[in-house]
Image: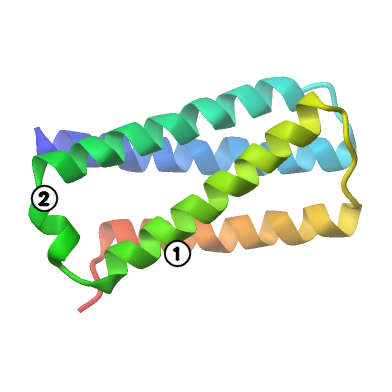
Amino acid sequence: MYFGLFGMHLLFVISWVVFLLLLIKSIQNDTKDKVIFTLLSLFFMVAVLGVGTKMMLLNPNVAKVGIWLHVKLSFDILLMIENLVLAFVVFKKKTISSKALEIMFWLSYLVFMFMVYLSVFKPM
């Protein structure tokens, strides 16, 4: 059961990154798909949080293995805050500069790659 949840967690993380990056680009290009990408990225954000919490409850020893998990969770929380800010921007029809969106795009891309690395390969 644990490894099934692990696979589902990775699938949800990858889906979240795809829809968050699409959300950033749709805000930057002012397309009509902003709302659907916002809803999908929020859905997968909650799914990642739920499945990750379930994995921690099934194997509580994971929390004691070292700082790598805390680094991953810190990045996860950073991107969740970014996702919520972007959702606020979309639903309140605010604007963000193109340069800030470009920085958010590449920062999110690199952080997600690092998070997947920390999920799959535990550093020694």
**Picture quarter containing residue 2?**
top left
Return the residue nearer the eye: 34 or 52. Answer: 52
Q: Residue at x 57, y 32 (%)?
A: 41
- The percent position of residue 92, horizontal first and vertical second, equals 82, 27
Q: What element carries label 2?
A: helix
Residue 114: image tag: 1
Q: Is residue 33 left or right of residue 71?
A: right
Q: In this view, does 44 lie to the left or right of 94?
A: left
Disc with the residue nearer the chain's start (1 vs 2) = 2
Q: How crowded is mark 1: few (under 14 residues within 10 Å), some or many (20 or more)?
A: some
Q: In this view, does 2 lie to the left or right of 77?
A: left
Q: Which residue is drawn at 14% across and 64% down?
A: 64
Question: In which quadrant will I find the N terminus?
Answer: top left
- The percent position of residue 71, horizontal first and vertical second, equals 38, 67
Evaluate whether residue 7 shows in this view: no
- The percent position of residue 32, horizontal first and vertical second, equals 83, 21
Reply above or below: 65 against 10: below
Q: Is mark 1 on a helix, strand or loop?
A: helix
Furthest-bottom residue in view? 124
Evaluate whether residue 93 shows in this view: yes
Instruction: Give the residue type that dot 1 points to.
Output: Phe
Question: In which quadrant will I find the C terminus?
Answer: bottom left
Q: Residue at x 61, y 23 (%)?
A: 39
Instruction: State the separation of the CA atoms marked 1 and 2.
Output: 23 Å
Residue annotated with mark 2: 60
